[in-house]
Image (cartoon, rainbow, N blue to C red):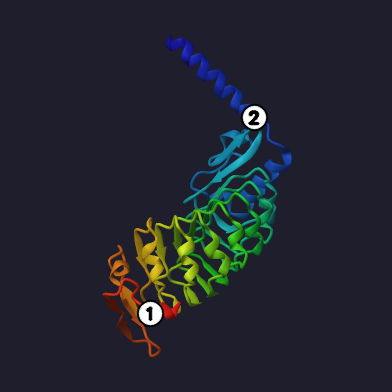
Amino acid sequence: MKSIITLFLTVVFSISLLANIPNSEKNILIKLNQSTNGSQWKVKWDLNAPVTTWHGVKIQNDKVVGINLSNNNLVGTLPNEITDLKNLEELNLFKNQISGTIPEKIGKLKNLKELNLSFNKLSGSIPNSICEIPHLNSLMLFMNKLSGELPSQIGNLKELEVVSLFNNELSGQLPASLYELKNLKELVLSSNKFSGQISWDVENLKELENLSLFDNKMNGHIPYTIAKLDNLKSVNLSYNSFSGAVSQALAQKEGFNCTMINEFGLAFQLEVSNNAKGVLAADE
């Protein structure tokens, strides 16, 4: 029995090595290798070996469907050609030293479900075309140097569950369409330069579990309806310029901190109200 199993595994492994992806896709991978100093990667690719042996490359039906090169010392920029990997479902380049910008036509990756370019040195804005990826489930771009506003049509990404963009230089108001992401579970925008108010439409985010807007420049009243989100476990809105009172229900959420910053840059504490709403209904 043991010899049969060994033979079976050998055959399966041999077949996998015969996987023959199109030359166009192989050339894109080689371009990625060259533009990110592949000779200095922690786990290198042998470009003369079958693509199936290349670290972090996932292949299905002779197509590249996944690239996971996290924490692998990629240094350089992302080639625009990477957006031509039309079958790609996962692009994970977390914790490298990639600089430059996110490819403007990243929206061409119509099958992408997970995009993780976090903990790099990316600059520039988040391309508007990112809103054209219909099945995107996770958008993780935290700890970069990204600037500009969130794309206004982010609400088109109906399957989004995770938006994690903390520690960047993003600014402007949160787009109205953001509150249309009814499957969103995690919204982490802390340590940016966002301004404006939290819309009362935040109550539409029924699946939200984690909300963090810590350390921005937001103002106005905090909608009491946030506390009514049944799945919400953790909230951090501190070190903004919110005013008024908050309800006890909200103040008791994990991570909630009443410390805010006034117009003079001084810290102050929001009042916690016994009123269930925390602010007058007229403020809606």
Within 10 angstroms of label 1, few (less than 14), some, or many (20 or more) residues? few
Question: Height in image: 137 above or below 278?
Answer: above
Nearer to us: label 1 or label 2: 1
Mark 1 lies on a secondary structure that is loop
Residue at 51 percent across and 60 percent down: it is 141
Residue 143 position within the rendered picture, expressed as x and y whole percent measured from the top left: 47, 64
Residue at 58 percent across and 22 percent down: it is 14
Mark yes or no: residue 122 visible: no
Residue located beneath label 1 in the image = 280
Mark 2 lies on a secondary structure that is loop
> Quadrant of residue 230 in the image?
bottom left
Image quarter of the C terminus: bottom left
Q: Is residue 59 left or right of residue 260?
A: right
Question: Height in image: 159 above or below 124?
Answer: above
Residue at 59 percent across and 27 percent down: it is 16
Q: Nearer the viewer, residue 190 or 50?
A: 190
Question: Height in image: 245 above or below 75?
Answer: below
Amino acid type, residue under disc 1 in the picture: Leu
Q: Are marks 1 and 2 in contact (CB under 8 Å)?
A: no
Question: Height in image: 245 above or below 111?
Answer: below
Amino acid type, residue under disc 2 in the picture: Ala
Q: Nearer the viewer, residue 65 or 278?
A: 278
Residue 158 position within the rendered picture, expressed as x and y whole percent measured from the top left: 57, 54
Q: Earlier in the sequence, mark 1 or mark 2?
A: 2
Q: Nearer the viewer, residue 82 or 47?
A: 82
Residue located beneath label 2 in the image = 19
- Residue farthest front in this picture: 282
> Quadrant of residue 244 in the image?
bottom left
Residue 18 position within the rendered picture, expressed as x and y whole percent measured from the top left: 64, 26
